[in-house]
Image (cartoon, rainbow, N blue to C red):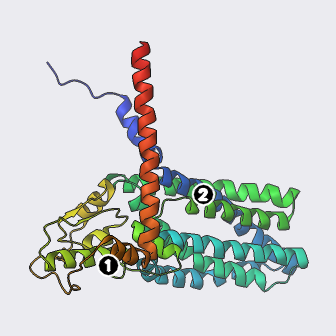
């Protein structure tokens, strides 16, 4: 007997994009949705600017120079993006990039409203091109934190499809809007598209530990893995417990990027999400142990605490005070929800 035949539908499935990352990750869905609207809006401006330049100058050379002036800022922004991504929270970087590009499009819209001058049509698109390099780098850096390591290539394929769709549909839509509504409406549509993209990024869960998130919200940063307040807190606790022979395990948790995990290598226990485990498994670099019980580092003198002293020290730390209270409230809320769930299950069982 021969081997069983391969199912005929499998090759067809391999030709289609796997949408599993979209189904699995809410944050990835938001990012893709916002980028789709943003790409369409960007293509509107990409068509509107040369159109307006030609309307003002009747010069094909001037139209060509518009693209040339965007080349060097685009290259500079792309080269700078690598270092900026490493030094800045990726979510915040995406939000800043969307705001800056929206400001450029708003400047073009205002220029069209007030009676168009030629120089903004060269300067503002060039600035937007430079910022787009930061936006692209931030997006590429944040995607691996949203999907599993095995799905990164699929996620990139989804973005490539999105951009191709924008390149086709955007100019077609721009032509219709320019003919029907005018160039000012097109620019304001682009501003609105960046607003949608900004909202999508804002809704993404921050990829930082809870302590880091509090400090960023309070205006601190930018932080690296070494200056991360959450990492510093775990290191201080570890040093204190080990220096004074306290047997309690120190367990780091609530990680949002591999750098935080690597900065605490050697900690007693670490709670690491599957996506970060995949990212760490893919890293072939040398992992240096940062925490060692035989050399825990400097630690303060052993504290002698009663309730009064404990409450005083807690109140001196605004982050600890707020996050502890928030954690208690959320745990109580979940406890009530669990009780209600169990009660409903028991009532349905009794009724049956």
Furthest-right residue in view?
115
Apparent side of residue 270 relative to residue 30 in the rendered image (left or right):
left
Quarter location, residue 264: bottom left
Secondary element type, mark 2: helix
Question: Could you say which disc has been placed on residue 18 in the image?
Answer: none
Q: How many marks?
A: 2
Image quadrant for the C terminus? top left
Q: Position of residue 334 (x, y in %)?
A: 43, 45
Q: Position of residue 348 (x, y in %)?
A: 44, 19
**Which of 107 and 293 lies nearest the eye of the viewer?**
293
Quarter location, residue 251: bottom left
Up-down relation of residue 351 to residue 232 (above or below)? above
Up-down relation of residue 108 to residue 24 (above or below)? below
Q: Position of residue 44 (x, y in %)?
A: 72, 63
Could you tell me how far apart the alpha carbons at marks 2 and 1 are, in whole angstroms? 34 Å
Which residue in the protein does label 2 denote? 34
Labels 2 and 1: the sequence-earlier one: 2
Quarter location, residue 36: bottom right
Is residue 342 in view from this perspective?
Answer: yes
The residue drawn where x is 18% and y is 85% is: 297
Image quadrant for the N terminus? top left
**Which of 84 and 306 lies nearest the eye of the viewer?**
306
Residue count near mark 2 (Cα–Cα under 10 Å), binned few <14, some 14–19, many ≥20: many
Which residue in the protein does label 1 denote? 232
Apparent side of residue 184 relative to residue 62 in the rendered image (left or right):
right
Up-down relation of residue 4 to residue 196 (above or below)? above
The residue drawn where x is 11% and y is 75% is: 245
Residue count near mark 1 (Cα–Cα under 10 Å), binned few <14, some 14–19, many ≥20: some
């Amino acid at each position: 007997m021969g081997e069983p035949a391969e199912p005929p539908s499998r090759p067809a499935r391999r030709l289609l994009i796997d949408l599993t990352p979209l189904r699995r990750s809410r944050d990835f869905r938001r990012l893709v949705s916002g980028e789709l609207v943003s790409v369409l809006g960007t293509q509107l401006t990409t068509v509107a600017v040369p159109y307006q330049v030609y309307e003002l100058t009747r010069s094909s050379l001037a139209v060509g120079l518009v693209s040339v002036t965007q080349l060097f800022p685009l290259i500079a922004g792309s080269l700078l993006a690598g270092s900026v991504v490493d030094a800045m929270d990726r979510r915040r970087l995406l939000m800043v990039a969307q705001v800056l590009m929206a400001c450029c499009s708003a400047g073009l819209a205002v220029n069209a409203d007030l009676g168009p001058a030629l120089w903004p049509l060269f300067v503002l698109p060039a600035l937007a091109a430079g910022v787009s390099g930061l936006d692209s780098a931030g997006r590429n850096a944040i995607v691996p934190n949203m999907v599993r390591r095995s799905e990164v290539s699929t996620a990139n394929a989804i973005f490539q499809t999105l951009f191709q769709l924008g390149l086709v549909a955007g100019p077609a839509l721009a032509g219709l809007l320019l003919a029907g509504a005018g160039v000012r409406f097109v620019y304001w549509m682009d501003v609105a598209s960046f607003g949608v993209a900004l909202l999508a990024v804002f809704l993404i869960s921050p990829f930082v530990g809870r302590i880091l998130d509090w400090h960023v919200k309070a205006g601190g940063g930018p932080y690296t893995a070494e200056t991360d307040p959450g990492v510093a807190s775990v290191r201080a606790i570890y040093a204190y417990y080990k220096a004074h022979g306290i047997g309690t395990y120190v367990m780091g948790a609530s990680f949002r990027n591999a750098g935080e995990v690597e900065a605490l290598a050697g900690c007693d226990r670490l709670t690491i999400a599957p996506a970060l485990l995949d990212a760490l498994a893919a890293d072939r670099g040398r992992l240096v142990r940062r925490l060692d019980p035989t050399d825990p580092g400097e630690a303060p003198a052993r504290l002698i605490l009663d309730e009064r002293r404990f409450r005083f020290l807690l109140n001196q730390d605004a982050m600890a005070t707020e996050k502890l209270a928030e954690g208690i409230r959320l745990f109580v809320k979940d406890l009530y929800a669990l009780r209600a769930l169990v009660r409903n299950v028991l009532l349905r069982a009794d009724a049956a």
